[in-house]
Each structure stands twice: as structure tokens, then as C-alpha cells.
Image (cartoon, helix red, strand yellow):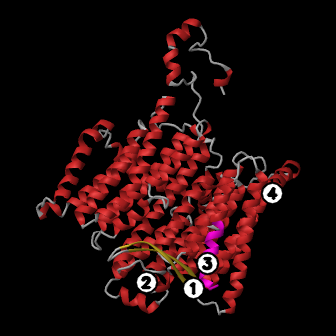
Amino acid sequence: MELSAWIQFMIGIPLVGFVISLLVPERKEYLLSRVAFYTAGLNLISVFVFLIFWGIQGFETLNLKEFTLYKTSDFEFLIDFFFDRVGAVYVVMGALLTFLITFYSRYYLHRETGYKRFFNTVLFFYLGYNITVLAGNFETLFVGWEILGLSSFLLVAFYRENYLPTRNAIKVFSIYRIGDVGVILAMWASHHLWHENVTFLKLSNSELVHEHLMGHSGVGLFISLMLLLAAAAKSAQFPFSSWLPRAMEGPTPSSAIFYGSLSVHLGVFLLLRTFPFWENQIVVRIIIALIGLITAILSTMIARVQTSVKTQIGYASLTQIGIMFIEVAAGLEVLALIHFMGNAFLRTYQLLVSPSIVSYLIREQFYGFVPKAKVQKSGFTSRLKLSFYIWSLKEWNLDKLINRIVFRPFKNIGHKLDFLTYKTVIYYFLPSYLIGIGLLIIGYKIPSAIHTYLPFIFSFIALLMVLKAFSERRSARLSWTLLIMNHFWMVLAIAENELFAWDEIAIYLSGVVVFGLSGLLIISYLKRETGQSGLFEYQGYVKHYPVLSFLFLISALGLMGFPISPTFLGEDLLYSHIGDDQFLLALFAAFAFVMEGIVTMRIFARLFLGSKKPTLLPATTNSQKRNLSMGSILKKGSISPFKSSPDHLN
């Protein structure tokens, strides 16, 4: 068997293990843990066997063109895998630490509610991790990138009955989606620079890269900065560092494998993988080093004042990752890889033993704590030290910074669109869209002076639809409908921009129609059964409708263009019809897609996760309302507006 074909095992084993774990009943803990344990163990053995044969053949770089999903005369969506020493280090670390975590979690999570969900998600994460580190081009990497984002959301929200884990899961997922803007725009610009879906094997050819960048230095700088944006968001570097402590709401094993060892280091991996592309761009290298330096300094100060041991470990890990950014910018690839291995093992160990350490420290403080003598000092140095202490306690307001410069402006724009109601969309925007698509079908020639601006106008309308859905709280149905309309307006924008074949439109919209309608039906069913239609609070319906919750999650993923939907391929097709000089159109499209992912998961979280705050009167379904009226209840004295049963006082 060829070595390149062996890479298929590294993808196939986690995939098979994940599918088998889905079929195991939840009550069979022993079987579930065995499936996860043997999956990780078998993959670990296959990795070591592969490395032996790879070493015998001289550690040659491997590239495996797996298969083509879709191909036209000027576009090809190719699944490609790539293996070199960077991939080797990350694959070995992933196999070792996943094996360790699955073994540890068998006992740590014993009799925990959600035992099956945890192992399902860990195996799903491991699949996405292997796809990412073995990817041979940006399209394949983005498949794994999306899987990592979803599994991160599910693990942070593991205790889904509680408010705080659910809210923090949305925050983490939102920052991940900001990083997705960088990957999407880098893919788009790369298509125009290379006129193909470039592989990482070609990127490692410095002469070929230099030849393509001659005369296109601006495009090269843009691609490099977008890759840096994606890497900084994924590795929680400045200014995105605030999401890491929020991600610690999940179980300790998930914190260890995600935010201590593997997932948080993937930003470093992305920079290492694309290093030959930007190594001659001095400006980019300086920016990477500065981001790493700022992160290392701030994270060091924040870690020293934390009261939570998991948060302290998380920020300590960020300090080391910031130093890795500096090492990568300096071209010290081997040192960065060694640093990654050491930091990953250390943080995994620290997080796994943190419960025992906390217990020991509490006991030590209880029996042997002696307060230090208070020494009052004055002077500039003391005031400066105190200021740093206060700012570090506030985590340098990085969370507020992201909200102020990213999410709050989007929300404010959405609030300006409150005139968009369900009736407005049906009566005005839907007919205007049908008129536009009708003119396109019959081939009506619009004057060129107007036609030039139509793609930007239509894509801006699509973005406004998403921003209104982002701020909408009164109606889940309206928010979901706006997300569906976003896709249709985006298709119209690209169709007016360049010839967009009908089969490509069908690929793109098929997922939107199927998953959009299924989600709309579920929202309507919930409204009919529970009487709830808004998104003002987390409803927690997963407890009563677990199957419906899973189906709605699938609908949300399909609508946002997750790799289970044809829309994922359609988005790449759509970007191939945006010109290399249409940065504004590409930006509108990228933000629309990314914000749609955030909104769909927010709708899912507010409907099915968290716990609804207790109200004075018990909630009644529509069927109960038909049989009982409030007047008759009060008349009989069964419920008083001033008295409530003990169950509703908690």
C-alpha cells in the first residue's frame, strides 16, 4: 500500500468511530467509552506505523488528490490531503492527547448527564482536527475548520441546561466565525491569484510563489492578513483573547483537549502551513510578531491575577502561543513545533489535575493560611503596578472591545431596520425579489450605468437581512425567514454580477430550501405547542423536545452552509463569480455568510438550550388555554396572583 493512501486511514478511523458512537444507546456507558477509546487507540497505532514507513522512505512530502466534488471549465472543488513534518507533529500530538483524554473521561464523566454527547462530540472534533491538519488545500482545510467550530460550541455548551455555558458557547462560536471571514476571503483572493484551487504543495514552492506575487503584491498582502485574522481568532490572540476563559465552561477533559492542547494551537498551524507564501512579506511578519508579543504580555498579567485555576491555565497557554507567533514570524519552524508539543502536554496535564490541585489548595489555606503584613507604598511605580493589577482583573476589557467594534455596530444597524416585519418581507421584499429574478430569466437588458451597481445593492440588501435577523428578538420565525431571504438575494447579486449557471444556482439553493423550510416548520410547531414565539430568553426546550432539538440543529447547520449541505459547495461556487477587483462585494458576501452562521446558532441556543427563567404563573399550552381561562382559575381560587406554588418560587 502506498504511503499517500495511508492518510485515508487517519481520516477514516475517526469517521467510523464517530458514526458507531452515534448508534450506541445512551444508557450503555461502557460500550460508548470503549468505542471512543479503541477509536483513538487504533488511530494512534496507525499513526506510529505510518511514521515508521514514512521515515524509511526518507520523510518525503506527500500529496494525495482524493476526489473532485464539482468541476467546470474554470472551477474545481478538490478534496486534497497533504503530509509533511508540520502535519506529522500535529497528527502525532492529536492522536496521543485524544487517546489520553478518552481514557481519562471514561471515569471522570461516569454517570454524568450527557455522557454519550461528550464522546460523540470528542470523536467529531477529532475527525475535524485530522481533516484540518492533513488538508492539502484551503477548501479541504475549511471543512475541518467548520467541524472544529461546531464541536467547540457543543462542548462549551455541554451543560446545556444552564444559562452561562450556553451564553459563553455563543460567544466562542461568534469569535470563531469572525476568523472564518479571513479564511473565506483568503480562499477567494487565492482563486484569482492562482486561477485555481491552489494546493499547499504548490505554496511550499518558493519560486512559484514569488513568480505569482510579482505584480500582485497587494493581493498577496491581503491574503496574508486574512490568514492572520483567521489564525489570531482561532488561537485567541490579541484582540480575540477574551473568548478563551469563556470556553472553560465545559467539562475539564474538553477544556484540556480543546483550549489547552489542540484546538487553540491551530492558529499557529495555519501560519506554519502558509509560511512559504508570506515569508518574504516583512510587514506581515512584523504584524504577526507584534500580535504575539502583545498577547504574551497581556496574558501574563491577566493569568497572575485570576482566581479560577482553569482560566489561569488558559491565559498561561495564551502567553506561550503568543511566543509561538513570534517564533513563526522569525522563521523558526522547528522551535515553534517543539514549543507546541511542550505547551500542549503541559497544559493538558495541568487541566486534568486541576480539580485535585484546587482541593489541595483549599485544604492548605483552611489549615495553614497566614495573611501577609500590609505594607503601604506610594510613588509612581506603585500606582503603575496597581493600575496594571486593576486592568488585568478586568482582562483589559478585551471582551468589551470586541463587542464595541464588531457586534454592537451590527446590532445597532439591525435595530434601525425594525420596520422589517414578517408582513413587510412578504408584501414588499419577496415581490421585488421575484421581479428581479424574473427580469434575469427573460434576459431583460438593464442599462449598464445601473447594472454596474446592482450586485453591490443586492448583496447589501442580503447583508441587511442578516443584520436584522441578528438583532431580532420578537419573532424567531421572522429571524429565520430573513436568513433564508439572505441567500436568495445573494444569488441575485452574483447572477447580476457574472454569468451564474442554473445548475450552480440549484446546488447553492437546494440546501437553503430544504434546511430552511425544515427549520421554519420546527419553529412554527414550537410556537403552536408552547405559545412561545420570541427570542428574548433561553427557552431550554431540549429537555422536552430532544429529537426536535437535534433536527433543528441539523437545519441550522444546513442553512448556514455547513459541509453537510450543498450550500457549502455553492458558497465556493458563488465566490468564483466575484471579480478580483470587487473587494466590497466579496466583503459583503463574507460578512453575510459569517453573520448568518452566528444568527442560526443563536436561534438554536435561545430556543433549545439554557433554562427559562421561572415565571409567576405556570406556562400553559394552547390546548390547555382552550380548556381553562384565567378568569375561571382565579374564580375557583386554585391560583392566586399573589401566591405561587413552591415549584415556581425556585
Can you identify the residue that label 3 sits on?
7
**Dots 4, 2 in contact, CB < 8 A:** no
Q: Which mark is residue 62?
A: 1
Q: Which residues are magenta?
A: 1-14
Q: Is residue 289 above or below residue 374?
A: below
Which kind of residue does numbered mark 4 sit on? Answer: Ile
Spot occupied by residue 509 in the image (x, y as percentages of width and height):
36, 56
Image quadrant containing the N terminus: bottom right
**Real-space Cα distance between discs 4 and 3?**
40 Å
Between disc 4 and disc 1, the foreground one is 1
Residue 11 magenta-highlighted = yes
| Label whose residue precedes the other's in the sequence (3 or 2) | 3
Q: Amino acid at mark 3?
A: Ile
Q: Who comes first in sequence, dot 1 or dot 2?
A: 1
Work out whether mark 4 precedes mark 3 in sequence or the reverse, and give the earlier one: 3
For residue 357, the mark is 4
